[in-house]
């Protein structure tokens, strides 16, 4: 009896987990592949199952690559793995690559790339991921998802400059976390509550005449001559000293900043930083540049521009502070977790960053903003021309060169030029806006406009704008 021949292209037996099914129709000739294909998501590129799928893949390769942030890419990856797991060819029970990937997503989903310590925590999670894949390598020898994951880990380590040797994240963050890394233990708390949203951060800034942006994104121009507390809570104290800028004017500017990082368990002893005009040190008053033990300092100072710009990174409280000297005066910007900023007693309620300047110390237009300068002309009064070379028109032009968006920072620049005649205040307003863009957690709130917080400039006639600025300058000089 003659044995019936098997049709060409038919599978030799039942579906096996170590390879894809052959196509049912001839596919177009494949394009030449590089020796190591770019990683597109740990298993997101299975072999085509038909000519149409193969053609679609070729067409996809012609398009520009899609560059997703690592965390978004991993969430997409997790979904793809679930789809693969639900397919006809199930992974072998002993291959635990999907569990490795799920653990990695759990360890990194709460991280925020804009926050200090992200790279360190991400590298720890990557090393834990790599260790998990190594432990299951024998069982996953023929698994395409596994091999794609290995390549993906290598690519991410290269992108983030992660070393292969070093500490790893615990796969059970409920049990183990770094007590001197706010992002680590905050993420663990969120994990226990089942909430993957990162903690909320607040921003406060002080610059120029001085202009204050509070934790609530209120903007004020204040007198506050002498020493005043910006922040005073259970973790941090910041005090500024302001002096008159021009004789006979109520306008002041900051010439001294004192910052106290309070002692915090085993993370750091109390550290005090002090800056005054022409003395912006890159060390604490005790001569040290960091706090805490070990290589990963929980508190450190980084000098960005000698004598002009330093940063302080307090990892244990998730706080970053920028201090600059622009011209003869100092500026400050700070980002701090909301839960820590709100940790203070009733006796500590005088905090400019928290509650703004007292009403008696404000010199703004009564609506929390310095003026509504929108490029209009101002009547030529003796006060406006008190500083040779600066009229409203010339001040507008100079500030617009640095700040094309006519928001409250632009207006503060114009106001400072008209009331002081000091061109350095232009650079101060510009650097203050740069600090907002670097530290403020919400991009849609970077710019504040002169009507309300919704970003729509206030309308009005040219006369009302001119009178508003004139009255403001009169207030300063009375």
Image (cartoon, grey):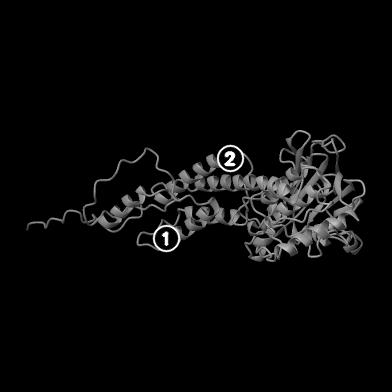
The alpha-carbon separation of the residues under discs 2 and 1 comes to 30 Å
In which quarter of the view is residue 175 placed?
bottom right
The circle drawn on residue 165 is none
Residue 180 in view here = no
Residue denoted by label 2: 162
- Camera-side residue of 106 and 360: 360
Numbered mark located on residue 85 in the image: 1
Task: Please give the name of the residue rendered at 88% of the width and 61% of the height, measured from the top-left corner.
Answer: 358
| Residue 354 as seen in the image, left or right of residue 169 | right
Between 129 and 112, which is closer to the camera in this rendering? 112
Residue 220 seen in this snapshot = yes
Query: Is residue 3 or residue 208 the one in the foreground?
Result: 208
CA neighbours of label 1 inside 10 A, class few (<14), some (14 to 19), many (20+): few
Point out the image quarter for the N terminus. Answer: bottom left
Q: Give me the residue at 78% from left, 47% from top.
A: 417
* 444 displayed left or right of 140: right
Above/below status of 106 relative to 257 = below
Dot 2 lies on which element? loop
Secondary structure state at the residue bearing disc 1: helix
Q: Nearer the viewer, residue 174 or 189?
A: 189
Precedes in sequence: disc 2 or disc 1: 1
Q: Position of residue 124 (x, y in %)?
A: 61, 46
């Amino acid at each position: 009896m003659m044995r019936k021949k098997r049709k060409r292209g038919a599978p030799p037996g039942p579906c096996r987990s170590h390879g894809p099914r052959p196509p049912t129709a001839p596919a177009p000739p494949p394009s030449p592949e590089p020796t190591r294909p770019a990683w597109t998501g740990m298993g997101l590129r299975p072999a085509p199952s038909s000519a149409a799928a193969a053609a679609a893949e070729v067409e996809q390769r012609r398009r520009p690559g899609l560059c997703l942030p690592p965390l978004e890419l991993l969430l997409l990856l997790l979904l793809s793995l679930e789809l693969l797991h639900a397919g006809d060819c199930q992974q072998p029970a002993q291959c635990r690559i999907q569990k490795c990937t799920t653990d990695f997503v759990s360890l990194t989903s709460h991280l925020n790339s804009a926050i200090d310590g992200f790279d360190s925590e991400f590298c720890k999670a990557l090393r834990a991921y790599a260790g998990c894949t190594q432990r299951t390598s024998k069982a996953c020898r023929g698994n395409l998802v596994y091999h794609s994951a290995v390549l993906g880990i290598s690519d991410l380590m290269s992108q983030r400059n992660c070393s292969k040797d070093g500490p790893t994240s615990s796969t059970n963050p409920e049990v183990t976390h770094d007590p001197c890394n706010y992002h680590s233990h905050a993420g663990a708390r969120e994990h226990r509550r089942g909430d993957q949203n990162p903690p909320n951060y607040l921003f406060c800034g002080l610059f120029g005449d001085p202009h204050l942006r509070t934790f609530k994104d209120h903007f004020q121009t204040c007198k506050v001559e002498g020493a005043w507390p910006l922040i005073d809570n259970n973790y941090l104290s910041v005090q500024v000293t302001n002096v008159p800028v021009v004789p006979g004017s109520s306008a002041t500017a900051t010439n001294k900043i004192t910052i106290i990082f309070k002692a915090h368990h085993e993370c750091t002893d109390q550290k005090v930083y002090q800056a005054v005009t022409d003395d912006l040190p890159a060390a604490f008053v005790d001569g040290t540049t960091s706090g805490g033990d070990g290589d990963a300092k929980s508190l450190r100072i980084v000098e960005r521009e000698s004598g002009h710009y330093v940063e302080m990174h307090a990892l244990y409280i998730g706080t970053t502070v920028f201090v600059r000297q622009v011209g003869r005066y100092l500026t400050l910007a700070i980002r701090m977790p909301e839960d820590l900023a709100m940790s203070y007693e009733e006796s500590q309620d005088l905090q400019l960053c928290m509650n703004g300047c007292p009403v008696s110390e404000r010199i703004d237009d009564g609506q929390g903003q310095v003026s509504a300068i929108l490029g209009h002309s101002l009547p030529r009064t003796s006060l406006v021309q008190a500083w040779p070379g600066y009229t409203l028109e010339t001040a507008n032009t100079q500030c617009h060169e640095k700040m094309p968006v006519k928001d409250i920072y632009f207006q503060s620049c114009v106001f400072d030029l008209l009331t002081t005649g000091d061109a350095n205040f232009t650079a101060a307003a510009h650097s203050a806006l740069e600090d907002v863009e670097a530290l403020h957690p919400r991009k849609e709130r970077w710019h504040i406009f002169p009507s309300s917080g919704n970003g729509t400039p206030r309308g009005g006639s040219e006369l009302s704008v001119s009178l508003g600025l004139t009255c403001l300058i009169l207030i300063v000089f009375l």
